[in-house]
Image: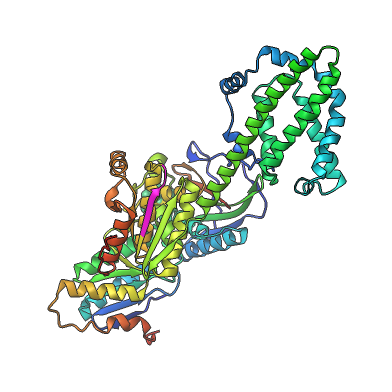
Amino acid sequence: MSSPQRPVAPHSYGSQRPPAAVPIGPVGAIGVDEMQLTDEEVARRMSWLEITADDIANLTSIRDVARGYAAEVIEDLYRHFLAFDETRAFFRDEQTLRRVKAMQTEYFLRLTEGNYDREYVRDRLKIGAIHQRIGLDVKWYLGAYNFYLRAVGSRLMRAFQDDPERGRACYFSLKKLVFFDIGLAIEIYLTTIRRQEEAIRELSTPVLQLRAGLLILPIIGVIDPTRARQLTEQLLRSIRANRAKVVVMDITGVPSVDSRVANHLVQTVEAARLMGATVIITGLSAEVAQALVLVGIDLNRIRTVGDLQGGIEEAERSLGYRVSRVEA
Amino acid sequence: MSEISTEPLVMPIANEADIVAARQRGRTMAIELGFAGCDGTLIATAISEVARNILLYAQRGEIILCCVELGGRRGLSIEARDSGPGIPDLRKALTDGYSTSRGLGLGLPGSRRLMDEFAIESEVGRGTNVTMTKWVR
Amino acid sequence: MQVPILKQGPVLIATVQDALTDADLHRLRDDLLQRVGTHRSLGVVLDVTALDVLDSFAARMLRTISHAVRMRGATTVIVGIQPGVAFAMVQLGLRLDGVDTALDLEDGLNMLARTIRSADPTSTTNLAGLAGLAELEWIDR
Ligand SMILES: Nc1ncnc2c1ncn2[C@@H]1O[C@H](COP(=O)(O)OP(=O)(O)O)[C@@H](O)[C@H]1O
Ligand SMILES: [Mg+2]
């Protein structure tokens, strides 16, 4: 056997794609990245909460005071946490408790450090995401802010005994910033939950057998390349397993059908045909269909029917069933 | 770019039975590596195409199968090389439907779609080298 | 590896048993065309259930067979393309335009029976047995 030399390349042509991004650690960072706030957005929120330069000055001015009471406040807070089963459950052992306390201390101290910028926001979001991730209900999370404000309030008043006006001003500045944090926390909770729901929904597209030989595949949510592959594979396997002859694929629940998605649909239809099954696509609006033809998608290759009901009727006709509509 | 984690397997291609052997071996390796669903078939099909090109255009050459690992991800890399006539115009050769042998002209562009990574080098009179990789999902 | 071809009334059934080389495919084409001629068959079912790869060469050959069979007045149905194979084929860009496909032998025979009957409703050819054929034991191994 001759062993061919590796040819030297005078010209070469290829698509060496960069390796796909590695998942980002244990932090629920999907939501955090999705929520990336611009500088303007941060400024806008600050002005909604009426956080001014004075407030920032107030906050940084109590940095040392805050350092003074930090340890006590944390101890109080954790006594409170440990008094409730729902929150105690999160501190399995001494070590966890120590670690979380240290993190919590850092979190509180950060409130009086100034520089409430995008980095600050990102940090806050991350912490919120972690709490959502470990399954701490938002009511406990928000309750802790209340506890904190009360615990710090009384200590600030004591620290500013000689100048209660200033003490009150600093307290209100702190309260504004805490509300800023609360806003972020609620949002990241909601974003993360929404993402999770979407992921679950998209991963579990049901293939329903309506009757012998007829499958229905209702697709809900965004179709990206990964999901398109899963859908196609799932459908082809179901065709074989159920000996399906006609499949009605309803895309009413797909928010945007662009040329890429349409190409996937065409591919799926073709593959099903190779196996001997016909696919009828429903829920593709006339406008979208027109737009797809304009960008060169050959819709002649796919059978489309306006709505799911019509698609099912057409499917039944091609299976040889007599279709009669029942008037409601 | 890929760090090699096992010994590459060299399969000579000199007749039709070699094409079948190479793609069957590729499928087995893919399954051992943890490829699921249709991936084994996609890989075997791509191997069949590049192996066929070797036989058809260069008469002989080899297919090298190799497990690769990058950033914790595992993949199967396939290299098809020959010292045949080479390809004068790679851009054309990678176009759907282009064939100098009245074939379907889908072997190269199709393999590129079947795999995650695809690169081709060729020099007229010296030979052709196709490297392609698919990553376990 | 030769592909066995079974004659059943007006229909020929070719069942691929294992991976095919290009030479096998050429021979299959020649065998089928010759038999369609000598038996005056009206239909051909080509069962590829056992194929785990259908590359561009094999696909082109299936298309060639189907077209050549049609030139001789018969219809071809390809049956048994596996899910993964179908998926790989479309990714590759293969479409088998103008070639009829069915899920399995039974569906393929039903399809042929319908096609043959609609092409010539007055045909006296007995098609009644076709649908039940899939159940038959293979005698021609
Ligand atoms: N290993 C090779 N050596 C020389 N030429 C090749 C090689 N592989 C592909 N080619 C050229 O590229 C063209 C396209 O290849 P391909 O996409 O596989 O289509 P096909 O083989 O059907 O022609 C071929 O027609 C041939 O001219
Ligand atoms: Mg080729």
Looking at the figure, which quarter contains the C terminus of chain C?
bottom left
- A202 or A144, which is in the foreground? A144
Depth check, front residue: C74 or A174: A174
Indicate whether A216 appears above or below C36. Answer: above
Query: In the image, C1: left or right of A110?
Result: left
Q: Nearer the viewer, residue A255 or C107?
A: A255
> How many callouts does the rendering have?
0
- Locate the N terminus of chain C by quadrant: bottom left
Residue at x 43% of width, y 75% of height: C17
**Is residue A139 shown to the viewer in this render?**
yes
Q: Position of residue A168 (x, y in %)?
A: 76, 17
| Residue span colored magenta | A248-255
Residue occupying the point 76% across, 25% down = A110
Dividing the picture into quadrants, the one containing residue A211 is: bottom left
By secondary structure, the bulk of the magenta-drawn segment is best described as strand
User: How was the colour assigned to the protein in this rendering?
Assistant: rainbow
